[in-house]
Image (spheres, rainbow, N blue to C red):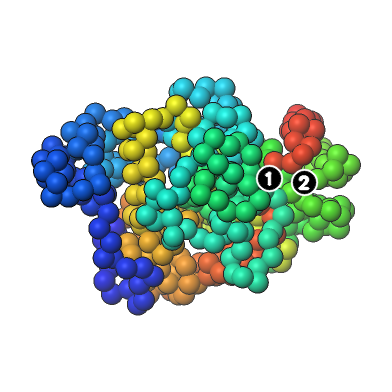
């Protein structure tokens, strides 16, 4: 499933580039002899001599801290990548309060808004990344197409750049210096058990329908959960927001009051924070409608249980993540980190993420590592010609299936808001915790 398919209908990039990455494995074997002799220039001898001794410590959410990626880094680049998976709140806290405990932070863009101004991370020089040119425009200027409207919330491009190499101030337009190099994103909606629901689901408002009393769930990560709650309240016609991604205290209070009333009425079976919790709630039938992530829906389906990622008329809630560098990184470790980030954008990981139901931030390179049928199913909204397999070879969808929500353009083009950190974030978190504790 990881081979380059030469039969892909129309390649989105050239494969003629010679990169340092392609040289690393041979260089490690020859200890830099060819480099030092002048046969090849631009690659420091120290890289080949010492790369096997490098260990980079990465932490982030479980969404993208994947053991298979660490294994592939060792195989392709020669050094060790240690991964630690935490929940979103723990990621934000560690990035600010324990800056020496990591080398690479794999974080979401709303977390970046909280973390980067603290000065524990260093801006990244985009001129060092050969694959920068393949990054989706969503992360550069916020637009899927030139005519797209930018969704509310903390859109990645709004916190994606700073003014200079030593800056912690977010730039209003793209610069040479990135806060995070984007890696992963998706358009999220409600997951449902269609076999246990007797009517069509087409609105975020359905989450609070009394018909699903005791069978609904929402995720308990405040900066994400509040956006789902806002989508629900707006769809119900109960709250009109000036900007869902940056609510006033009054808007926050109204939203939380509605959610507390629903909780006291017994609407919610549970609140979840982890991927596994959401899968178990849905697979068991304890919950029939809930906030969900695309791969969690696929995980339920892989158990032979009906589950659907339901497109809704009000649109999707989007999120995105990327890789950032610790302030303390220098020398060989910094070079290795840049090499890793550029490799991340080169396609293998992108294809892996696409097969999980996420989207690669560099879709053009990911296509080179996917079959024509895989690309058609995951990205173009086409009917699968054969079984669609997960990265570890399990059947996720049978031949004839079509991805929930359709093509990449249909799904990401219907985004209503991004996960967000608001000006009134402290007030929002306090009120959210009141909701959970009510």
Determine if residue 229 is in view: no
Q: Categorize mark 2 by other alpha carbons within 10 Å: few (<14), some (14-19), many (20+).
A: some
Which label belongs to residue 246? 2
Q: Which residue is most to the front? A: 38
Q: Quadrant of residue 84?
A: top left
Residue drawn where x is 58% and y is 43% of the image: 162
Say which of 363 and 124 sits in front.
Answer: 124
Q: Give how far apart the Cα atoms at labels 1 and 2 are.
A: 7 Å
**Label 2 SS:** helix
Say which of 392 and 375 sits in front.
Answer: 375
Q: Quadrant of residue 225?
A: top right
Say which of 413 and 189 sits in front.
Answer: 413
Q: Indicate the quadrant containing the C terminus: top left, top right, bottom left or bottom right.
A: top right
Q: Is residue 20 left or right of residue 143?
A: left
Work out whether mark 1 precedes mark 2 in sequence or the reverse, and give the earlier one: 2
**Are circles 1 and 2 on residues that touch, CB within 8 Å?**
yes
Say if 312 sits above or below 400 in the image.
above
Residue drawn where x is 47% and y is 42% of the image: 124
Q: Categorize mark 1 by other alpha carbons within 10 Å: few (<14), some (14-19), many (20+).
A: many
The spot of residue 56 in percent (x, y) is 36, 32
**Label 1 SS:** loop
**Numbered marks: total:** 2
Q: Quadrant of residue 335?
A: top left
Say if 197 sits above or below 341 in the image.
below
Reading the image, the residue beneath label 1 is: 420
Determine if residue 329 is in view: yes
Residue drawn where x is 66% and y is 51% of the image: 172
The spot of residue 128 in percent (x, y) is 39, 48
Residue drawn where x is 55% and y is 41% of the image: 164
């Amino acid at each position: 499933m990881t081979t380059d398919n030469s039969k892909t209908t129309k390649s989105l990039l050239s494969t003629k580039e010679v990169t340092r990455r392609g040289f690393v494995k041979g260089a490690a074997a020859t200890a830099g002899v060819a480099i030092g002799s002048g046969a090849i220039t631009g690659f420091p001898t120290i890289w080949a001599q010492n790369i096997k001794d490098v260990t980079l410590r990465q932490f982030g959410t479980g969404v993208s801290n994947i053991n298979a990626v660490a294994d592939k880094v060792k195989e392709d680049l020669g050094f060790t990548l240690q991964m630690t998976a935490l929940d979103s709140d723990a990621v934000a806290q560690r990035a600010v309060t324990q800056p020496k405990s990591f080398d690479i932070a794999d974080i979401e863009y709303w977390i970046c808004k909280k973390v980067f101004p603290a000065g524990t991370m260093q801006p990244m020089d985009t001129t060092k990344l050969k694959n920068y040119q393949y990054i989706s425009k969503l992360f550069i200027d916020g637009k899927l197409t030139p005519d797209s409207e930018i969704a509310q919330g903390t859109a990645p491009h709004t916190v994606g750049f700073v003014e200079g190499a030593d800056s912690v101030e977010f730039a209003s337009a793209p610069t040479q210096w990135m806060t995070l190099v984007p890696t992963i994103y998706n358009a999220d909606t409600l997951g449902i058990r269609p076999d246990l629901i007797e009517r069509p689901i087409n609105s975020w408002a359905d989450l609070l329908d009394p018909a699903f009393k005791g069978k609904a769930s929402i995720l308990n990560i405040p900066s994400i959960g509040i956006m789902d709650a806002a989508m629900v309240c707006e769809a119900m016609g109960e709250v009109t927001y000036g900007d869902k991604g940056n609510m006033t205290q009054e808007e926050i209070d109204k939203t939380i009051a509605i959610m507390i009333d629903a909780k006291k009425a017994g609407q919610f079976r549970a609140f979840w924070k982890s991927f596994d919790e959401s899968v178990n709630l849905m697979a068991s039938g304890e919950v029939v409608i809930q906030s969900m992530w695309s791969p969690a829906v696929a995980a339920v389906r892989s158990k032979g249980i009906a589950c659907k990622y339901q497109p809704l008329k009000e649109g999707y809630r989007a999120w995105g993540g990327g890789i950032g560098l610790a302030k303390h990184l220098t020398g060989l470790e910094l070079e290795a980190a840049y090499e890793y980030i550029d490799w991340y954008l080169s396609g293998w990981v992108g294809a892996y993420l696409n097969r999980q139901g996420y989207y690669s931030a560099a879709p053009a390179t990911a296509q080179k590592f996917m079959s024509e049928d895989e690309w058609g199913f995951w990205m173009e909204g086409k009917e699968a010609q054969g079984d669609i397999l997960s990265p570890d070879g399990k059947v996720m969808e049978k031949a004839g299936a079509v991805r929930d929500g359709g093509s990449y353009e249909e799904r990401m083009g219907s985004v209503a808001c991004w996960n967000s950190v608001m000006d009134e974030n402290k007030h929002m978190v306090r009120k959210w915790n009141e909701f959970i504790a009510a």
